[in-house]
Amino acid sequence: MKRGFRRWLPGLFVGCLLVPQVLIAADGVERRRADATAAAMDKSADPERVRCRRMQVTGSHFPKRICRTRREWDAMRAAASDMMEKTNLETQAHNRNQRY
């Protein structure tokens, strides 16, 4: 029993010494990551910044590169969402009026 205790005691001692240093290093990494994320969000929040996306176009096997400003992408997303909501409401109204 003593022999097992002697084996893991030095490892435990070294581990206790290293844990605070590892936590401090991890905290620094998290802080840098948070700063980088905040900087990227500030940069991407600009409504006039042009963003390019590769999108599949109907009638083609190859994706096409489409570039628009963030404001334009947001407007397209809002229009698509409104259209889907309108379609869903119309479908629900039609289903309620239909007799089975």
Image: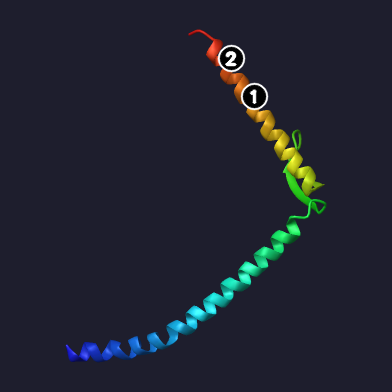
Q: Which mark is residue 87?
A: 1
Q: Residues within 10 Å of mark 1 (few under 14, many from 20)?
A: few
Q: Which mark is residue 94?
A: 2
Q: Nearer the viewer, residue 78 or 55?
A: 78
Tell me the SS state at disc 2: helix
**Residue 86, placed above or below residue 33:** above
Instruction: Name the residue rendered at 56%, 20% in the picture.
Output: 92
Task: Report the quarter where the N terminus lies.
Answer: bottom left
Q: Amino acid at mark 2?
A: His
- Counting from the top left corner in percent of width and height, residue 26 is at 53, 76
Q: Residue furthest left?
A: 1
**Residue 23, placed above or below residue 11:** above
Q: Nearer the viewer, residue 43 or 4?
A: 43
Residue 62 visible in the shown view? no
CA separation, marks 1 and 2?
10 Å
Tell me the SS state at disc 1: helix
Tag count = 2
